[in-house]
Amino acid sequence: MRKINKTLFFLVAFVINLMSQTTDEPRTPKLVLNIEASSWVLLGGVSFNSEVLVLHSKKYNFLVYARAGYFKGYYFNDLFDSGYRNGLQGGFTFLQKIGNHYFESNLGLYQLDKYRSCGVSNEHKLVDENKIYPLIRFGYRYQHPNDNWMITIKLGFMGLGVGAGFAF
């Protein structure tokens, strides 16, 4: 009877041990789509971005994504100077991974056109075309390992930003 109990105990312990070990490592997303809203005093904007994995170092938990997106921003200086900017952005996103948390930095360029509101009719006139601005931001990204949704908080050229997205 003792022999059966010992065998049964070790068999149950072995099965529990097998069930508790997982060899599945969360996969690294190859494509990320997100939307970000940012604001800096009297300037605010929204951008729609896509990122594609370029480099993944498992040894250093480091990822690099190439990023591209569209930006639409609004500004208000005073009653006679307001309008919007729109344009494209491109660059790289660098991520240092710690669990499901990431330190994120973005480096690249914005190409923006500036439109100014004119008079009471609120028509918009192009005043600056193809201005290039730096894209420099630092922040935090949380990415859920199973569902692959993500949230970001950033500070940079366009001010304080918050974003959400999904990784594939």
Image (cartoon, rainbow, N blue to C red):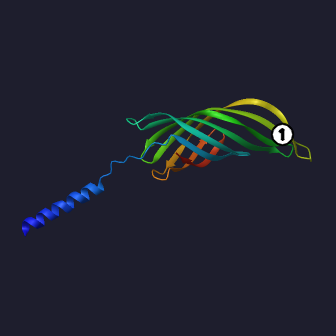
The spot of residue 57 in percent (x, y) is 42, 34
| Vertical position of residue 124 compared to residue 54: above or below | below
Report the residue that reaches farthest toward the bottom.
1
In this rendering, position of residue 120 left or right of residue 34:
right
Q: Is residue 114 above or below residue 6?
A: above
- For label 1, the crowd category at 10 Å Cα-Cα, with few meaning under 14, some 14 to 19 and many 20 or more, is many
Above-or-below relation of 18 to 156:
below
Q: Is residue 115 left or right of residue 153?
A: right
How far from the left and from the top, in percent, is residue 90? 63, 33
Question: Which residue matches tag 1?
Answer: 116
**Closest to the observer: 65 or 109?**
65
Residue occupying image coordinates x 45% and y 52%: 146
Identify the residue at image location x=48%, y=44%: 102
Residue 97: image quadrant is top left
Is 70 or 16 nearer to us in this picture? Answer: 16
Q: Nearer the viewer, residue 89 or 75?
A: 89
Q: Quadrant of residue 106?
A: top right
Residue 38: x percent and y percent? 66, 46
For image coordinates 38% across by 46% down, the residue present is: 25
- Circle 1: element type: strand
Q: Amino acid at mark 1?
A: Arg
Quadrant for residue 91, please give it: top right
Q: Residue furthest right?
A: 120
Task: Tell me if I can see residue 17 in this picture.
Answer: yes
Rendered location of residue 144, percent (x, y): 48, 51
